[in-house]
Image (tube, rainbow, N blue to C red):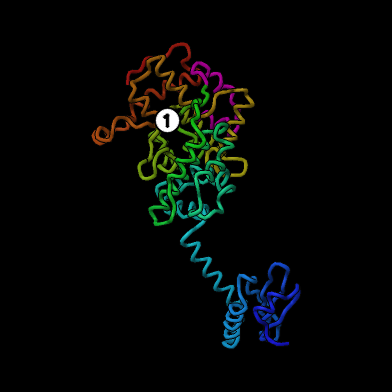
Amino acid sequence: MGKLTAIAIKNAPAGRMQDGDGLFLDRTAKGGRWTFRYQFMGKRRDMGLGSYPAISLSQARQIRDKWRNVINEGNDPVDVRKTEQEAIKAERDKLDPTFQEMTETVLESIKARLRGEGTRGRWLSPFTVHLWPAIGSKRISTLAAHDFRDALKPIWHTKHPTAEKAFQRARLVLREAQLMGYDVNPIIVDQAVRMLGHVNHVVTPTPSTPWAEIPALYERLPETNAGQCLRFMILTLVRLDGCTGITLDEVDEDEAVWTVPADRVKGVEGKVTDFRVPLSRAAMALIADQARFHDGTLFAGLRGGAITDRALEVCLDKLKEKGRPHGFRSSFRTWVQDVDACSWEVSETVLGHKIGNKVERSYARSDLLERRRTVMEAWADHVTGTNVATVTKLRG
């Protein structure tokens, strides 16, 4: 059989046609498919060269000849082409990564300024739950406003705070990507927000136990790690991460002071410091009691390590208590207001809040430890029922 011609191919019926030197055309009614058949190291292989008529006869011959030269050089055409394609893909990924890849790159670049390098605040959670399943595999150069709109439309009204967090972090990713030189426009995230429209979201404060009911709750809490941890949170008014991770070596028993490490203090990475907490007699007694059973983390979970926030909530749920652990801080703050227990600056420092502006704080460097100790002892008296009937006014 002679070599093929363009006219012969055009007029040929469906079927396999051979041009010679391993070049075949599998003709169909509307086109066809070019194949290069060759042998390499004793094995026959078929290599697709593309479709007809997109690739003409002369082009197919040129492609075949290229791969025949590869064989003459001692290489397998299929393996060489795979390597070339992987190199092209790697270059494309480098210049135009997927949204998920770009998010991971940005997190790597900013994690030094995030608490726990992004793990503590579950920085990736909005991406893994809501964004990546919908658009994580899309190239960032192809992203459009409707992609973000469609991804978060299901939770825009029902879980608006979560949706807002997702948009804010997506905007950050695209802004950082643009600064890195990638072909992307961060404004598409803002356009998506406009498409979704305004939401009248009312922030619901964390439920808190009225301060007058705190002594009864304190008494009802069980003698379990969860119950003891909740008691400790009530007595110290330190946030969840600080209390659940406490170890005995953080406590100065002689001074009755607990130093919460900076990595468990709320704030921006690099701008928080260790926080000293004056411990009341009740708090010291609770620590001593827990230390009898735990030589590491004082409030350990069932599987070791620190107890979880869920375990604390379950404990309160079993008591049918609507207040939440973080709400104890509000209970204290309301108690201070109602009984005029101490000055505003002392009560705010008890809660670990910053007082004054940056300049004022640069001069006023005291952490008011002893003034806080007085009010914390009075609060402990109220909590434990020692001084329920009469609250002594303490002016810090």
**What is the crowding at mark 1: few (fewer than 14 residues within 10 Å), some, or many (at least 20)?**
many
Q: Tell me residue 257's x, y (percent).
A: 40, 34
Left or right of 350 in this view: 129: right
Q: Is residue 284 above or below residue 65?
A: above
Q: Is residue 95 above or below residue 281?
A: below
For disc 1, the marked residue is 279
In magenta segment, residue 227: yes
Q: Which secondary structure is most common in the magenta stretch?
A: helix
Q: Tell me residue 61's x, y (percent).
A: 61, 81
Residue at 59% across, 73% down: 82
**114 vs 249, nearest the viewer:** 114
Q: Tell me residue 24's x, y (percent).
A: 69, 79
**From the image, which quarter does the N terminus lie in?**
bottom right
Q: How many marks?
A: 1
In magenta segment, residue 372: no
Start and end of the magenta stretch?
209-232
Q: Tell me residue 315's x, y (percent).
A: 61, 29
